[in-house]
Amino acid sequence: MRQESLPSTFFSKNRQELCQLVESKSTIILFSNDLMSRNGDQYFPYRQDSDFYYLTGIEQVNSTLVICPDHTETALREVLFIDKPDPDKEKWNGSLLIREQAKDISGIENVFYLEDFEGLIPQFLMQSVNIYLNSNEYPKYNSQVQSKNHRNALILMQKYPLFSFKRLQPLLISMRLIKKPEELGQIKMACSITNRSFKQALKVLQPGIKEYEIEAEILAEFIRQASDSPAYAPIIASGRNALILHYIKNAAVCLDGDLVLMDFGAEYGNYASDCSRTVPVNGRFSPRQRQVYSSVLKVFKEAKKLYIPGNSIQAINQQVAEWLQDEMVQLQLLTKHEIKQALPGKAYMKYYYHGAAHFMGLDVHDPGGKEIILQEGMVLTCEPGLYIPEENLGVRIENDILVHSNPIDLMEEIPVEIEEIENLICSLK
Ligand SMILES: [Mn+2]
């Protein structure tokens, strides 16, 4: 990681909290992410499994965490296994953690090399009846590639069939939903980098520029600010491209008179930010673009007030969709008659076809269901939009909001008002 990681106390606290959530006589086993092959002998940049990072701070491949909260042998209550340093490999890929370093990062006293894992497993399990294993339970997760957690779950279940295997994921989700102060610090850093990159993008904005040239400005600023990676592939969608929600080709020319929708967010210290702004390519909104933008902005401002304890994504989605539907009538996209004719609550689907909120944290789409009752300390996006194929335009405005009785907009600094954006584009030229 290019930034300083969180202190080991953060990871220790998380492990202690997790131990309170598991049943007695349990062993928790968690594996790091695999290094993913790209082609030939090349790999994708390594990104640690978010849960593994959350509990250890360790960003090295081939790491394993075992926790036995009530083991009689205290040395076996928390053990981290890492790759043994190898001077030959290190000439190519840089130094691997030594045990002392891994201990300092994670706060785990007992660090062993991976070669000891097999031999020690029976000793952990001896005093357990339950084995907690992690898995990706994100509803939209649909990978053909088995994760290390999944692979090892199959091996352990075959080897120890008489144990009671349990899901770790629901416990981790409940913890990750509420952000600790350290996490909010990282998210705020990510948001501030995203803010700077927006201004950088506006500097180059002009008719004739390619979408990927705007992307280049954003990514350059991320890297200058020590972001390891964008939190997701930036979407730079001019004109009609904005109708495609996950348009990441970013290959078109931005035309005079079009809007360009930018959905981008830096990752900082493994924490995400997620922002959308829609701006006029030539620096001035046309009267119609102004109308549509104002509608989305109005809903956005009202929607932000909904991020209070007791609400839910489900309820926010429904309210935002209703407000947007009202705006569609104002903008003469729908008639009240058409709304009555359509299935209940479905008329707006023609011009608004995504949710208004998702949880955010270590992942841009942090785990957590739409029915979860919001509590203070949760972070979600607020992202209403309107997409009008007949007019070749899409507008989305998106900020990250901290749930509070008086919701806190973590992206308040990023310009969003029409005049602000027009003046900014003008002044940056
Ligand atoms: Mn989003």
Image (cartoon, helix red, strand yellow):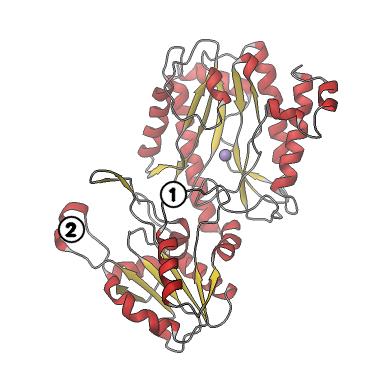
Amino acid under label 1? Gln
Residue 414 in sight: no
Q: How many marks?
A: 2
Q: On the image, numbered disc 2 is attached to which residue? A: 89
Q: Is mark 1 within 8 Å of ligand 1?
A: no
Residue at disc 2, secondary structure: helix
Q: On the image, numbered disc 1 is attached to which residue? A: 144
x%, y% of residue 425?
51, 19
User: Which of 379/319 is in front?
Assistant: 319
x%, y% of residue 144?
44, 49
**Image-quarter location of ligand 1:** top right
User: Which of 407/55 is in front?
Assistant: 55
Q: Is residue 382 above or below residue 64?
A: above
Q: Is residue 130 above or below residue 321?
A: below
Quarter that holds the C terminus: top left
Quarter of image, res 105: bottom left
- Apparent side of residue 263 relative to residue 307 in the rendered image (left or right): left
Residue 158 in sight: yes
Q: Residue at x 39, y 73 (%)?
A: 108
